[in-house]
Amino acid sequence: MHSRQGHRLKPVTGEQEELRADARRNRARIVAAAREAFAEDGLEVGVAAIAERAGVGNATIFRRFSTKQELITAVIEQRMSELLATARAATTGDDPADGLAVFLDHAVRTHVEDQGLVECAAAQFHGEPRLVELRDALLAEMTTLLRRAQAEGSVRADLEPEDIPVLMFSIAAAAQVVGDRPSGLYRRYLALALSGLRPHPDDVPLAPPAPSVEEIDRGFAAR
Amino acid sequence: MHSRQGHRLKPVTGEQEELRADARRNRARIVAAAREAFAEDGLEVGVAAIAERAGVGNATIFRRFSTKQELITAVIEQRMSELLATARAATTGDDPADGLAVFLDHAVRTHVEDQGLVECAAAQFHGEPRLVELRDALLAEMTTLLRRAQAEGSVRADLEPEDIPVLMFSIAAAAQVVGDRPSGLYRRYLALALSGLRPHPDDVPLAPPAPSVEEIDRGFAAR
Amino acid sequence: MHSRQGHRLKPVTGEQEELRADARRNRARIVAAAREAFAEDGLEVGVAAIAERAGVGNATIFRRFSTKQELITAVIEQRMSELLATARAATTGDDPADGLAVFLDHAVRTHVEDQGLVECAAAQFHGEPRLVELRDALLAEMTTLLRRAQAEGSVRADLEPEDIPVLMFSIAAAAQVVGDRPSGLYRRYLALALSGLRPHPDDVPLAPPAPSVEEIDRGFAAR
Amino acid sequence: MHSRQGHRLKPVTGEQEELRADARRNRARIVAAAREAFAEDGLEVGVAAIAERAGVGNATIFRRFSTKQELITAVIEQRMSELLATARAATTGDDPADGLAVFLDHAVRTHVEDQGLVECAAAQFHGEPRLVELRDALLAEMTTLLRRAQAEGSVRADLEPEDIPVLMFSIAAAAQVVGDRPSGLYRRYLALALSGLRPHPDDVPLAPPAPSVEEIDRGFAAR
DNA sequence: GATGAATGAGCGTTCATTCAT
DNA sequence: CATGAATGAACGCTCATTCAT
């Protein structure tokens, strides 16, 4: 656990090391405002609206993020960081199957509340190094989580760690098409998906194989 | 089966019965161009780009579709019609479980090829009568398909017809996050989902209950 | 009177001598529809709206009038013809002062009912020969009307025939600024203007002199 | 008189108190450009033309006036303010009849120079609060001006303050139909109108009554 | 001859981004 | 540093006019 401290990721919020206190505060307010705005209205909200929400002038946003895309990336980065924390917490528990369930529940709920943002997140990934770093850290946790569950026989053996984030998006998408109405609907499809992960006598091997990380990256890039 | 022919829906492409031959051809070219453009670039492509793709002037589009939204609706309508045809074909087969699989395979592949369009389709549903009509027809087929599979014991009993379109979106989303690369990846997640539909000794009832059509509509409206 | 028949103007409706009966009827319907449309909505109504009102296809309008401007001219021509008839009727009466009043009442009421059209009429005059012809005929009647009223002393002597159409527009404009509400308001300002035409002991000569026809034309052209 | 200073209207050009110096200058240039453009070409000139005339990008206009209509309103507001100043100056003079004449001369000349703008002004009035305020202030001055002239017997008694703006439009329209050519022609019709305001032994009461302010408003609204 | 269809130029407006205070 | 102001390119849409049936 403390070893985790050792290889802790660098501060996730960018080149802020040099920022004055007020600038740092502004940056945080901007990211928070953007996150809210994206969650409520989708990525197409105007920069002006985000600036107003943050209580700063619009030019201030561009001083911190030279592009709207960079701001989007910062928001995604924040979310992924939180997701990573969730994953780490899930890995520490005693019950592997439960850990996976808890992680997916948290992740999916988060996505579902974030209308339109996360489903687009993939498209925004474009090799951004900090996001890649987070992605890899997440994948490491997924591997631990999954392998332990498979070791105890509660998840079919041919599932791969790379499948987990895919499932996460998939279940979130299920709930999102209907706006998660009635609220909490996502739990129905999460339950169905989880029950589908259990080994079953009639199982035939999954095919084709799970995408490698490189393929995932290439997939993202093609968007 | 032939009775199905009897209550076939009216021609799905609108009040085009009165159009002159050239106009009809142009209309078709516009819808096709829009479909391609939406599939490749998403709904936010400019009308001008669609017009160019179709080889017509931009005003020609507005002669047939008084609004861009109407054009979007026409494209969705077309896709849903095709989906309905697929569903009907699937319903006629002998093997219920296979019918469901074949339908989902076709539906998901279609969605996956159509990056960004169909995932947004829901948001565009807003009570458009022709789309509602198609939705209901589709649901009727889903009901037949599902109930037969449940009757023979190949699908768990607590799945509802309304779950099927949700699953369709869900699986498509799984593949879409990675751009379906390597190509055909969707089959992995389709297989996983289908195997998850089988009854299992440890099954606990799905909860919360599936959304009703009204709830789905309300969900769409809230977007 | 019959001498008036002698120098009757050529048919006012244009090059229709060659038209087939149905074409002639269509032309008339178009002009009538345009007149209504202009009266209700102003000159900026779309050609399509006029076509619909006339019950013809839009291209039919352009078959008869190669330009929207030509159609406007045709409508103005029709109105001026009617005005000329009114003027001639007014000239035949016994009471000169009353003749002037009756003419102006009719002319102004007509203008006022024709929201936005006639006030723009001037700007559309551009040397159109048929309109010039009508203008001259109207002016001839104005001269008769005015000179007789001046001869009997009911109108001040320094008023000129060219002033009459100006007054007509002027009074109509008075009522039009308030949409002639309450209806018939134009009569207030007509009465005021007419009473202002009477000779008065304190009269000083009007200055500058009335515009000549050439100056009027140049004025129109400058628009 | 100095009390008039006391209840002077707020600055008429809007909430510009907060604008930066350069923005204020640009705003003024835009309004000036719009005024010129409207005067020369009418209200239908494109925003792009106005922007070019003002030497700014088109989007700059929309930063200050969220709508073209707002820009129109601003121009009208400016003109009305100037008219109000003229009216106040006219009210301070010793000779009531002369005050009225001077005011109308100024007002009409202004309108005549402004081809097409002011005649449309009415249609743009729609309850805009600042314009209503100015209208009321103007009417107050008209009342003073008229009642004093009537008290000394130089204007017929049945004229009402509401008639004055109507006359203003009316006389301006007289000159406008011929483009005020030869230049200054408006003075002819102004003189005629003014002489018509004098009491006359044969006067019969004006009818129907002058429109109330409410009726004027309703008339405007009906356009 | 009559028409529906087609169209390019233009409209008012928005927005991510750059400039100047 | 923070900001309001400025901007050009693009958007969805309209319209007088031309084309093709």
Image (cartoon, coloured by chain):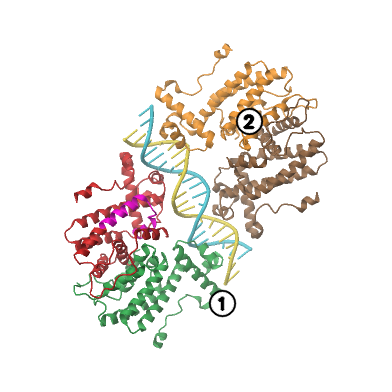
Chain colours: A orange, B brown, C green, D red, E yellow, F cyan
Task: Give the residue at mark 2.
Answer: A169
| Tag 1 secondary structure | helix
Left or right of residue A146: residue A20: left
| Any part of residue B52 in sight | no
Label 2 sits on a secondary structure element that is helix
Image quadrant in which you'd find residue B222: top right
Q: Tag on residue B11?
A: none
Q: Quadrant of residue B90?
A: top right
User: What subunit carries mark 1?
Assistant: C
| Magenta part of the chain | D118-141
Image location of residue A1, percent across then percent down: 59, 12
Q: Nearer the viewer, mark 2 or mark 1?
A: 2
The subunit letter for the residue under badge 2 reads A
> Looking at the picture, how far across and down is residue B68, in whole percent?
56, 49
Identify the amino acid type marked 1.
Answer: Ala
Q: Give the quarter of the image for residue C185.
A: bottom left
- The Cα–Cα distance between marks 2 and 1, rounded to whole angstroms, is 71 Å
